[in-house]
Image (spheres, rainbow, N blue to C red):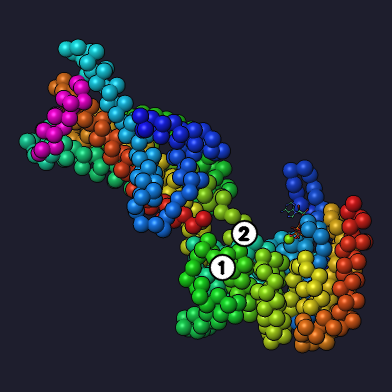
Amino acid sequence: MHGYLHIDHAKMVFDTKKGKFTALSDINLDVKQGEFITLIGHSGCGKSTLLNLVAGLNDPSDGVLLLSDKEIKGPGPERAVVFQNHSLLPWLTCFGNVYLAVERVFGAKEPKARLKERTEAALDMVGLTHALHQRPNEISGGMKQRVGIARALAMEPKVLLLDEPFGALDALTRAGLQDELMRIVEETHATTLMVTHDVDEAVLLSDRIVMMTNGPAATIGDILEVGLPRPRDRLKLAENPGYHHLRGQVLEFLYQKQLRKAA
Amino acid sequence: MSAVTFNESSLKDIMNSPDTTPLPDAATSAPRPAFFPPSGPAFSAAVGKLLRAALPPLLGMALFVLLWQIVSASGGEHGLPGPAKTWESAKLLFADPFYDNGPNDKGIGWNILASLNRVGMGFGLAALVGIPAGFMIGRFQFLSGMVAPIVSLLRPVSPLAWLPIGLYVFKETEPASLWVIFISSIWPIILNTAAGVSRVPQDYLNVARVLNLSEWKIFTRILFPSVLPHLMTGIRLSMGVAWLVIVAAEMLTGGTGIGFWVWDEWNNLNVEHILIAIFIVGIIGLLLEQVLVLIANRFNYE
Ligand SMILES: Nc1ncnc2c1ncn2[C@@H]1O[C@H](COP(=O)(O)OP(=O)(O)OP(=O)(O)O)[C@@H](O)[C@H]1O
Ligand SMILES: [Mg+2]
């Protein structure tokens, strides 16, 4: 018996002009339903690649990925992705971008008015009601990322895959969206995999932090269990000694164990 | 005097600008008080900007007319008609552009319309066939491999080489000239559309894959809008080719059209009219191009 999401000896080899490049090797991970996992590691180690494997956008060169005991074969709307580069369609408005996803997931069983409501609610949640009818090239980078988040959340996915979703946001918006994400995930019980570079974010949000070694042939270096009670409050956590201990452990992994290897 | 120094400085600006854009962009680096009412220094700055933009083309045109005058004057009695004489002739010609004295003597307006009509039909057919073909070739690697040798073989063929085939198959000049326009303007549409389809960014296709969109939705929401700018480039190039080809084709097929008219005036030895025809062809080509550029800009999302 294994977890809801089961990754077994996954390996990813890319064919490049200079020959084969092994990005990931021997990835083993079991994720429980409703669990919040963050992936952390240095740039270029293969976090996006691992997320793409779970999304089904890439097939593993070796090993197997199972979601509720079924092999992951290609992508699907039950696994929503917030892409690292937001990937909005430039010819659609913010509304249009989210609506495309809502229509795909709920269009068969709900009337148009309800789809419209869902779309507006999703954009409202990320604070973009005022930008409904603007095109991606007319809004800031942070706003684009928020549209990307709204698009994924509006699909009410079973698995939520986020690739540095808050990367281009200022600290304030970032904090607001982190709280929002915690609330939504608690409500929907979505199983979440999120890539981040931010240690505080990782500790605040996750049940477990998956720390990856540097590539090539990156693998999971260590997994940190975050036992902090929920619901979590960023202000109270700041006074929690456990929080600082966890933070220290992640930092140590990233900046002592891994950096030395890279050097 | 002031105009000369002005021009020198603008030339220097162009030379110094790192990317040497063809338009004098120096105005952006100079302080530009945009919100003041047009008076005093702001007003003269605005006038200066206008001058700077208008001066080079005006100067170029003036030089062109001057050269023309010199060439025509140096030819003596049998030289080319000069600008003034051509202008007078043009005024006469356009005084009554839509007269109709039987099949071989129609006003210039009718001839222009006949040519535009042919270009529109031949080019429209090319678009009708070329756009879907381009999409198919871009989407399916196998098809692309099949078509590639045919395209590379046929594309370099001179448009007029197709005319005898058209005449032989259709037995009439009208469909033959449409055929020539069709076959010579279809390649840019096919090639640009296909290139656009194969260059749709992977990110957009990933969105389609995650959402698991239907083929139809992928086409209308992702493929088509993404290819549109390339498609417009193809259409622009192909329209240019069609307009180039029509004049030559009409010279050979006769009847009506600006090309036929040129040939007819050559037989009448009316050189002014030939010069006028060259201007007409140039101006209409320019207008067509500009209209298509305007439409293309409408679909530019970057
Ligand atoms: N399609 C591909 N073809 C070839 N190599 C690839 C491809 N995608 C990723 N790689 C390589 O795999 C490695 C991991 O890339 P990946 O994008 O997963 O890194 P990352 O951890 O997400 O980095 P970042 O934090 O900067 O986003 C990199 O060395 C990258 O060059
Ligand atoms: Mg990445």
Say which residue label 2 marks.
Answer: B203
Image height check: is A23 above or below B159?
below
Q: Residue at (59%, 69%) from the top-left corner?
A: A143
Q: Residue at (61%, 71%) from the top-left corner?
A: A146
In the rendered view, does B19 fall on the left or right side of A52?
A: left
In the rendered view, does B213 fall on the left or right side of B101?
A: right
Mark 1 or 2: the one toward you? 2
Rendering quarter of residue B1: top left
> Residues under labels 1 and 2: Cα distance?
14 Å
Percent x, y of residue B85:
16, 25
Q: Tag 2: Cα neighbours inside 10 Å, few (<14), some, or many (≥20)?
A: some
Image height check: is A99 above or below B234?
below
Say which residue label 1 marks.
Answer: B213
Same subunit, tags 1 and 2: yes
- Prevailing SS of the magenta stretch: helix
Percent x, y of residue A51:
74, 66
Secondary structure state at the residue bearing disc 2: helix
Ligand 2 appears in which quadrant? bottom right
Q: Residue at (84%, 53%) from the top-left corner?
A: A216
Rendering quarter of residue A194: bottom right
The range drawn in magenta is B81-96
Indicate which disc, 1 or 2, sits on the residue closer to the N terminus.
2
In the rendered view, does A4 fall on the left or right side of B13?
A: right
For disc 1, the chain is B
Q: Residue at (88%, 62%) from the top-left corner?
A: A255
For disc 2, the chain is B
Give, as a three-letter code, the residue at label 2: Asp
Percent x, y of residue B110:
16, 40
Residue A62 can be seen, yes or no: no
